[in-house]
Image (spheres, rainbow, N blue to C red):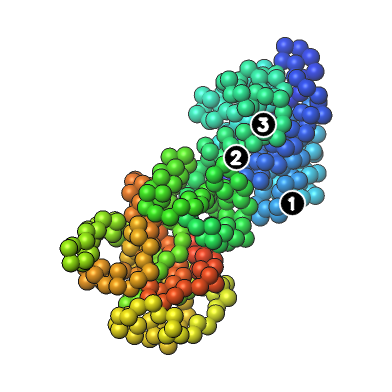
Amino acid sequence: MSAQAVSVYGSYKESGKYRSDGALSDFKSACRSIGGALVRNGFRVIACATHETSADRYVVEGALAEAKRSNRGRPAIVWMRERGVDEHNAFFEKLQSNDPNHFESQPIARARKSELAFDSLKLADKLIVIGGGLGTLTAADAAKMAGKEVIAVGAFGGAAGQLTDGDPELNASWSPQVLRALVRRLVRAARVDFAVLTIKDTEFDGLMTALRKQGRFVVDGEVQRGTITNARGEDVAIVAMNAEVQGNLEAYEATRTLVTNFAPRAVLLVGIGGANPLGDAFFGDVVLGSDVIDFTIQVRSRGGRTRFSSKGYPYDAGLRRSASALREALRHSLAKVARRSLRFNDKELTTTNRDVREAIAASFAANRRPRVHVGQIAASDTLVKDAKYIVPLLHAHRALLVFAMEGAGAAKAARNTPIIELRAVSDVIGYRKTEDCVRRASRAAGLVATEFMRLHPLDE
């Protein structure tokens, strides 16, 4: 799926009923800033006017400067090629000849220039109006009738000043604050393919490091937002948020925020976890959840025995199938994490359970390469460090691979939105973990999550 396209209509009027407020130089500067912000946030710009006072002309200048700076791999600017050869075509052809990678022309069959703008409107997902006169008002009405969002920047008066619907942020004098308000309006209504939730700062840092190598991300309130290009050459729109506090309740609230504010096509819970010492996962491995087992409710008997009321929540079937199909490809991304040879030290064991001690020692002795698994992930509001805690669980759930603290809350909050959980193994329960293992696992989680979003077919 290609990036959303935005048309910017308007002009600076020195006199008349729709006379513009402020200076022409400020109008030009504002339009350049809008063009740069559009490209920076993953939008494509549709341009059709080249007059000295038209908004399009300067929006294109700003968009081109940002496209060249960020070295986008796809055209950022679509211009309407009129029938025949005239000043309009010559203007854009000159720009395209100098920077061919950033422009794409769209031929039109209209013979009348007055209808040129309406052809560009058909291609646009959204319309921004700034300044302008009667033609701008007419275009805005046509866009609304076609069901397209119209965002009016009233900072320079004119027609746009009559269309701001009382939005004080967009009707104020032009400033960086107005530009930020405009970007918020644009991106909050834009399509989101994946909403990614992390819990710890190290997890978020690992995720964003991997994402920024694939695309450009910007801060948008409490999230970071941007796009990466998938294996099909399509844009994948992503928002990422760090909940900062562990636990199922916090994950529930954070997931509801993402689902409510951004309506993503899927939610990805990304982080680190402790491996079941009797299971198949080990240091450096990554687990994608087939389902989450909720151990948040527990009962202690008089004799001190703990009993658990567990409930399973299967993760989305389509995402699970994709995870299984992509396991080998995802494993290759783990090669980017510098492999550190771990040596077994029985002094680092934190359990007296003989089966657990022997299983951990055997896993160290195997000295295998990191793997990607698809399997069960446990969720509990208790941080599991003692192997004795998990022994009762394994009698009922022998397939558990990783223990974490947020999956149940996130799965409940997602409701009808597809969700899957991804955990990199930072420690094995019963063996003391190190900060180095936490950093490496956080990086591995970020790399595999990014690769999963890059390879997962959007049409699924």
First in residue order: circle 1 vs circle 3: 1
Q: Residue type at mark 3?
A: Val
User: Up-down: is 163 above or below 254?
Assistant: above
State whether residue 241 appears in this view. Answer: yes
Distance in Å between CA atoms under marks 3 and 2: 21 Å
Position of residue 231 in the picture relative to residue 281 (left or right): right
Q: Residue type at mark 2?
A: Ala
Q: Residue furthest top?
A: 17
Q: Are marks 1 and 2 in contact (CB under 8 Å)?
A: no
Percent position of residue 125, x then y: 56, 36
Q: Residue furthest front?
A: 302
Question: Label 1, on which residue?
Answer: 69
Position of residue 326 in the picture relative to residue 188 (left or right): left
Residue density around tag 1, few if under 14, some if 14–19, many if 20 or more, within 10 Å: few
Q: Nearer the viewer, residue 360 or 434?
A: 434
Question: Label 2, on which residue?
Answer: 5
Q: Residue type at mark 1?
A: Arg
Distance in Å between CA atoms under marks 1 and 2: 20 Å
Residue density around tag 2, few if under 14, some if 14–19, many if 20 or more, within 10 Å: many
Q: Residue furthest bottom?
A: 365
Q: Where does the C terminus fall, quadrant-wise?
A: bottom left
Q: Residue 9 is drawn in which quadrant? A: top right
Question: Label 3, on which residue?
Answer: 178
